[in-house]
Image (cartoon, coloured by chain):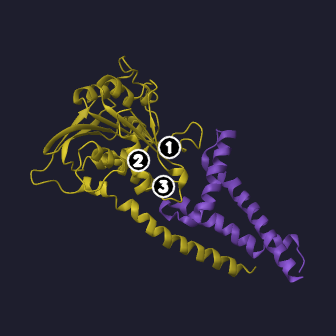
Chain colours: A purple, B yellow
């Protein structure tokens, strides 16, 4: 099995990690009572990201950090997906 | 990966979240202190009166007095000092229907009525909570009208209900999820109790902090503490990640705990110490 860019960007591990980071947190954002322990990773990423963003650019409202949050979560997911696919490729050899 | 698989995984994840969170949300609905405040009054009941503050002016706003059957301290609660902080306004309105066991509750739900009507932080003369300089006359007619009422009722405790945009300590300039209080207040107990009973462990940034407030500044709760010797609290929740019902739940729970801590509510529940 070869480790292609297309495979890494859309691997099950990439998509799964992205959904896990964004969906539980997104539900909690829509309605606070829907926050759950599974939202914790996304919650921490968003809280820290908004703190850094607010320090750098205090003129922006805190909801604007959804854009870097989604991009950052996809970046993290691609790293996880790459690691997963690489491990699978090594095992398959 | 097939689209159906992705959609299926996302759907299952969302359904799981809703189920888990439904149990967590239960805490917000069953706060023992709020239940005690809402419980029907004793046989001899409570007496309620409403008067108009700043009558005949554009700032005219109701002031509610709730007298419990037993003697006790006077607690004055303010909402709507800032007109777009709906948690304070909503909860202060609710409090006028509470049934304390002792003492007197004086509630002004819409302190800055013009700001409340316009859904803006500030009313006609700027930020109302900067109009109460210490040892001097309040700066505007509205501030003077409110201060006259505070002096008249001479409260033992003042609770001012607010909402910030961000979180204290996490976002510079913002003061959400904090209880600012005078040195003689039960700020630490209040924050600890809210954290234990209401803030889920998986929302660590939203844990309340108590801050003793000693710097002189022209805020209503500081003037009441400085000139009348009131024990004073300024409660702040946050708009960050919290919907209106949760902000209200935190604010309602904080108000009920302040009443319990100062002897207006009898309940078997104990505020954490």
Instruction: Residue lying at the far left in this picture: please name it.
Output: B44
Choose the circle earlier in sequence order: 2 or 1. 2
- Label 3 marks a residue whose chain is B
Left or right of residue A32: residue A17: right
Q: Separation of disc 1 and disc 3 at Cα?
A: 14 Å
Q: Separation of disc 3 and disc 2 at Cα?
A: 10 Å
- Label 2 marks a residue whose chain is B
| Residue B243: mark in rendering | 3
Residue B5 lies in quadrant: bottom right
Find residue B43 and report its horizontal and vertical position in percent: 10, 54
Q: Is residue B56 visible?
A: no
- What residue is shown at x 37% (from left), y 44% (from top)? B89
Q: Which residue is mark 1?
A: B176
In the image, residue B125 sits, relative to residue A80, either above or below, namely: above
| Residue B87: mark in rendering | 2
Choose the circle earlier in sequence order: 3 or 2. 2
In the image, residue B61 sits, relative to residue B166, either above or below, namely: above
Q: Are marks 2 and 1 in contact (CB under 8 Å)?
A: no
Residues B201 and B83: in front is B201
């Amino acid at each position: 099995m070869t480790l292609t860019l297309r495979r890494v960007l859309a691997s099950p591990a990439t998509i799964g990690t992205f959904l896990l980071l964004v969906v539980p947190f997104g539900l909690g954002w829509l309605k606070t009572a829907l926050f759950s322990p599974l939202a914790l990773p996304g919650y921490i990423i968003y809280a820290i990201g908004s703190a850094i963003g607010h320090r750098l650019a205090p003129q922006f409202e805190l909801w604007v950090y959804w854009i870097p949050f989604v991009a950052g979560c996809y970046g993290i997911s691609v790293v996880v997906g790459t690691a997963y696919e690489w491990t699978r490729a090594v095992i398959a050899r | 990966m097939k689209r159906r698989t992705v959609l299926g995984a996302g759907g299952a994840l969302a359904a799981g979240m809703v189920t888990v969170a439904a149990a967590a949300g239960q805490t917000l609905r069953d706060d023992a202190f709020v239940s005690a405040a809402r419980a029907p009054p004793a046989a001899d009941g409570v007496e309620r009166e409403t008067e108009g503050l700043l009558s005949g002016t554009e700032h005219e706003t109701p002031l509610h007095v709730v007298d419990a059957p037993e003697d006790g301290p006077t607690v004055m609660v303010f909402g709507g000092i800032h007109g777009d902080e709906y948690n304070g306004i909503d909860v202060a309105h609710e409090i006028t229907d509470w049934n304390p066991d002792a003492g007197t509750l004086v509630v002004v739900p819409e302190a800055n009525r013009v700001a409340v009507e316009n859904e803006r932080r500030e009313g006609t003369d700027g930020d109302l909570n900067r109009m109460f300089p210490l040892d001097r006359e309040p700066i505007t007619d509205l501030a003077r009208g409110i201060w006259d009422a505070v002096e008249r009722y001479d409260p033992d405790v003042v609770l001012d209900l607010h909402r910030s945009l961000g979180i204290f300590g996490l976002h510079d300039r913002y003061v959400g999820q904090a209880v600012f209080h005078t040195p003689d207040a039960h700020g630490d107990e209040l924050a600890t109790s809210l954290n234990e009973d209401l803030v889920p462990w998986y929302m660590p940034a939203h844990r309340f902090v108590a801050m003793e407030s000693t710097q002189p500044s022209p805020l209503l709760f500081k003037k009441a503490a400085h000139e009348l010797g009131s024990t004073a609290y300024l409660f702040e929740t946050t708009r960050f990640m919290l919907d209106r019902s949760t902000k209200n739940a935190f604010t309602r729970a904080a108000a009920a705990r302040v009443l319990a801590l100062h002897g207006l509510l009898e309940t078997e529940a104990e505020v954490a110490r």
